[in-house]
Amino acid sequence: MKCILNIRTFWVLVHLFISIFISQTVNACQVPVFRYALERWASDKYELAVFFNDRLKEDQEALVSSLDISANIEILRIDVKNMSGSEIAKYGNVLVPEEKVIGQLHYPWSVGRGNRSIDPDVPLWKGELTTESLGLIIDSPVRKSIREKIISGESAVWVILGSGDKEKDLTAEKELKEYLQKVSQKIEIPEGVVGPGELDRVASGEVDVEDVLRSTIPLKISFDVIRIEKGDPREKIFSLMLTSYVPHLTRAYPNQNLIFPVFGRGRTLEAIPASVMTEEIMMKACTYICGACSCEVKRENPGIDLIMTASWQDALVGSEVVVDKILPPLTGVGDLVQTDEVNNTFEGLVASENSPNDDLNLNIEDELIGQFPINWIIGSLLLAVLSVILFMSIKISRGS
């Protein structure tokens, strides 16, 4: 009787395991990460603190008010002669020359929350706020090009930061393009994605609404590359947004090319140093960007939003509703995610200039492999439990 009960219990648990495993898998959204981020994630807002004496003059107020509302920036006006205690604690004593306006640009609060190496209270840029500097904050030629390419259907635009060595820059660009061409031929759009004109299938219950595209932008696997020359004054602030996000990489790889993927509404992940770039690493990174996403919130995901001036709602059809999603868990690369292990890895590289390249590549590949989706973790644990139950059932049966 015990044997029968145990065997019956075993099969009940088997059915439970299958049901949970399937339910976890079914809940996954089939829309690729890059497209989901474009259609359904509002960009996090940067903070631009504007410091002045007593009051802004008419032309200064006109300058501040001229900020394009489509840029993901929030402006805070602060009179340095009447700062509150909390403002002094955050910004310190800011000195503003007479007749001038000083600006401080800060990352969104979510960046500091997700990366302990970054203090969002420390400005990534500080200087006199003029028509020229404000223009460089809100937009630049490279960002305009990125925006156009994404709206045309590019899965991601890979930005190469120049090293100052022309030959090295050209080599990095050539290698990156070759790798991207190879991996783009191997990656496929996740099955189950439904076009925006097939909403009747949602009404009939045939497909889930989360698998429906919300715009008519072409859905394809395609990557482009843009290189920023080191010291380009037009991209000064944009380059700061990128490099200030990965201080451990800029320390570990001085005067080397850092390569950032930009997708969605201007979202990027941690950089890949050109010196450790391989086809395998690029395959994993691109598969991550083009893979199906799962259903959680945006702020739990790796990466940051860059400042982009774009009327996304005008460019997208039917994208008014913003639904939070989580990207598949990923650790690694220069690693596309902030983790203590990654930071320690690169800090160790700074301390040891003689680390073998083979060891470095191995570390990065291990980090890139990342974590399994939660459904696989749950499935593995349940399978282990069921295996123990089956073993005990057989043992009891033989004993009987």
Image (tube, rainbow, N blue to C red):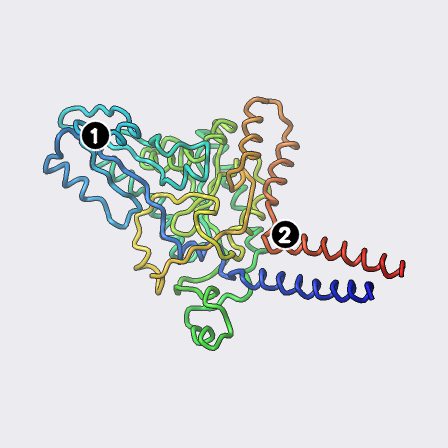
Vertically, is 278 above or below 327? above
**Left or right for 281, reference 227:** right
Image height of 193 relative to 305, above or below: below
Question: Residue 323: where, in percent of width, then height?
Answer: 41, 58
- Using the image, determine if residue 249 lies above or below residue 336: above
Figure quadrant of the C terminus: bottom right
Helix, strand or loop at mark 2: helix
User: Looking at the rendered structure, which numbered label has been put on residue 377?
Assistant: 2
Placement of the N terminus among the 4 image quadrants? bottom right
The picture places residue 93, in percent across and down from the top left corner, at 25, 24
Residue at position x 30%, y 35% in the image: 105
Question: What residue is shown with label 1?
Answer: 83
Q: Which residue type does callout 2 highlight?
A: Ile
Tell me residue 101's x, y (percent): 19, 31
Which residue reaches farthest right? 399
Query: Label 1 amino acid?
Result: Met
Q: Residue at x 48, y 54 (%)?
A: 296
Q: Position of residue 173 (x, y in %)?
A: 49, 40
Give the residue at the far front of this rendering: 1
User: In the image, is 48 to the left or to the right of 63?
Assistant: right
Label 2 packing within 10 angstroms: few (<14), some (14-19), many (20+) = few
Q: Are the residues tagged 1 and 2 within 8 Å (C-beta)?
A: no
**How many residues crowd around disc 1 within 10 Å: few (fewer than 14), some, or many (20 or more)?**
some
Query: In screen coordinates, is 381 left or right of 297?
Result: right
Q: Say the numbered circle drawn on residue 117.
A: none
- Residue closest to the eye, 84 or 305: 84
> Residue at 31% of width from left, 36% of height from top?
234
Question: Which is nearer the N-term, disc 1 or disc 2?
Answer: 1
Distance Cα–Cα, label 1 vs label 2: 51 Å
- Say what secondary structure mark 1 lies in: loop
Between residues 284 and 395, which one lies in front from this camera angle?
395
